Image (cartoon, rainbow, N blue to C red):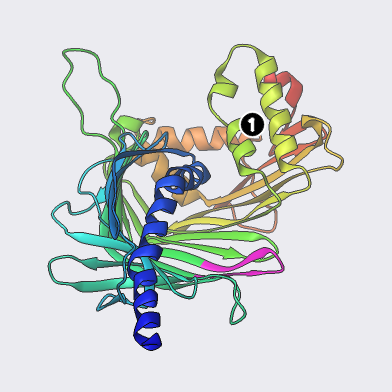
């Protein structure tokens, strides 16, 4: 009789006690956990219509952020009952699972909107997590990412691939639409430092910039926009973090509201940016437009001081930013750091170099609406060279033009023109 008794007690523990305690834990800690996660992405989380049951629970999560024009709302369905988790798209022995249908509207939503995709998160019996997605109608898996918790078998590790049909992100500056996007992760921690790679690529992406406000009675203009082919972003974590971005072709659909021609082609792009030991929140706050547009020059000095303290002992390097099309290109590189110990903005050091084909500059000037003719554009370019804003390296042909921006000990130089930064700030 002891064996049935122990089996009954074990089943009672798995079927009633464990789910009941999990539900109680969710009821007590779910709001604070979501708030901490939302704070990490500079957002605010709100829970509504919370229903905690013995084996199943549900809630509505509303996420608000300054980087979304509209809130994001998700209906969360949670399972914390005695089930094996051997679903086709969730192959694991689990104790907790959460799934939600990705929204078709809101700050971030699926694109095209008629897609029906479920996202799920499963915690298995070994303390690991699995994040995945599948098409609800076809029951087709769209991949999964494994989040290994630190155990004796392995260290903290995030590995996997997740592919979505596309999404639309409503930002304050416009709409970003991405089609057929894939997210790949291979991250781990080594001696407390994050290492590995995180990448995202898509078939195409469109950036529709917020339309310019027009006066009453004037005809409405199409908003400026840009179409990118095969965009890709890679993040590499090592001694320093490196961001690489690229696209195969950038086509300007309509840039007339920005003073540029409708058919401007940006061509291919490749960029590589690296940094270490930088407080990005403080850096972005110091670069906010409001800190530079105030009439009081002391506000600009304070912004430069904030930028200096945010950099501290860190360094920001732009290894390359290249735009190329046909036989022409433009290339940027530079670095930004401070002289330790950093006391104020005069300890900032900036070096930025730009190189462009004369043909590329003339094509860009002609495609814009700022010059009425090619002769006027070439005359303006020659004047910039004569005044020292642009120069031609002695060892290169006249078709290669360069410009440099340097800041050192409070002195600013732009190519052959030198200034006192204090005077510029006034």
Which residue is depicted at the point 75% across and 36% down? 309
Q: Which residues are magenta?
A: 186-197
- 58 lies above or below 7: above
Q: Estimate the x, y position of residue 190 in percent, counting from the top left.
A: 67, 70
Residue 114 position (above or below residue 408) = below
Name the spot of residue 421 as percent of width and height, x first.
74, 26
* 420 or 315: nearer the viewer: 315
| Secondary structure category for the residue under label 1 | loop
Task: State left or right for residue 105 relative to residue 276.
Answer: left
Q: Which residue corresponds to the image point at 45% horizontal and 51% vertical from the top-left? A: 359
- Establish if 25 lies above or below 344: below
**Closer to us: 188 or 252:** 188
Tell me if 88 is positioned left or right of 370 in this view: left
Is residue 22 inside the magenta stretch?
A: no
User: 163 or 92: nearer the eye?
Assistant: 92
Q: How many marks?
A: 1
Residue sitting farthest toward the front:
1
Judged left or right of residue 221, residue 391 is: right
Residue ID at (24%, 61%):
118
**Quadrant where the image shows the C terminus:** top right
**Residue 344 left/right relative to 295:** right
Q: Is residue 189 magenta?
A: yes
Which residue is the site of mark 1? 387
Which quadrant, please, contains the N terminus? Answer: bottom left
């Amino acid at each position: 009789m002891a064996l049935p008794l122990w089996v009954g007690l074990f089943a009672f523990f798995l079927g009633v006690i464990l789910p009941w305690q999990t539900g109680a834990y969710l009821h007590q800690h779910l709001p604070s956990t979501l708030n901490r996660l939302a704070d990490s992405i500079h957002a605010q989380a709100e829970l509504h219509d919370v229903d905690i049951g013995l084996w199943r629970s549900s809630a509505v999560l509303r996420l608000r952020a300054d980087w979304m024009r509209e809130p994001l709302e998700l209906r969360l369905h949670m399972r914390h009952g005695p089930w094996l988790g051997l679903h086709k798209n969730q192959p694991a022995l689990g104790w907790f699972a959460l799934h939600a249908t990705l929204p078709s509207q809101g700050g971030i939503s699926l694109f095209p909107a008629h897609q029906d995709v479920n996202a799920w998160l499963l915690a298995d019996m070994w303390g690991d997590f699995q994040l995945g997605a599948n098409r609800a109608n076809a029951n087709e898996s769209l991949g999964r990412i494994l989040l290994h918790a630190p155990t004796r078998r392995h260290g903290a590790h995030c590995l996997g691939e997740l592919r979505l049909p596309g999404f639309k992100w409503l930002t304050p500056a416009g709409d970003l639409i991405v089609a057929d996007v894939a997210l790949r992760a291979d991250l781990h921690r080594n001696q407390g430092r994050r290492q590995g790679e995180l990448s995202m690529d898509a078939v195409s992406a469109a950036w529709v910039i917020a339309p310019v406000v027009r006066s009453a009675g004037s005809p409405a203009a199409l908003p400026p926009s840009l179409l990118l082919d095969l965009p890709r972003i890679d993040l590499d974590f090592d001694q320093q973090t490196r961001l690489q971005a690229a696209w195969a072709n950038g086509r300007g659909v309509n840039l007339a509201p920005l003073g540029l021609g409708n058919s401007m082609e940006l061509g291919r792009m490749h960029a590589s940016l690296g940094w270490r030991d930088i407080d990005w929140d403080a850096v972005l706050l110091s670069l906010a437009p409001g800190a530079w547009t105030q009439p009081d020059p002391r506000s600009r000095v304070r912004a430069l001081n904030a930028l200096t303290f945010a950099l501290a002992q860190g360094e920001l390097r732009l290894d390359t930013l290249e735009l190329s099309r046909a036989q022409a290109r433009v290339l940027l590189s530079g670095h930004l750091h401070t002289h330790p110990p950093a006391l104020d903005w005069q300890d900032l050091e900036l070096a930025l170099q730009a190189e462009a084909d004369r043909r590329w500059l003339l094509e860009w000037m002609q495609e814009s609406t700022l010059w009425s003719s090619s002769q006027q554009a070439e005359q303006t370019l020659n004047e910039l060279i004569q005044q020292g804003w642009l120069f031609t390296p002695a060892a290169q042909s006249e078709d290669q033009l360069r410009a440099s921006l340097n800041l050192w000990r409070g002195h600013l130089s732009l190519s052959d023109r030198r200034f006192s930064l204090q005077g510029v700030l006034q």
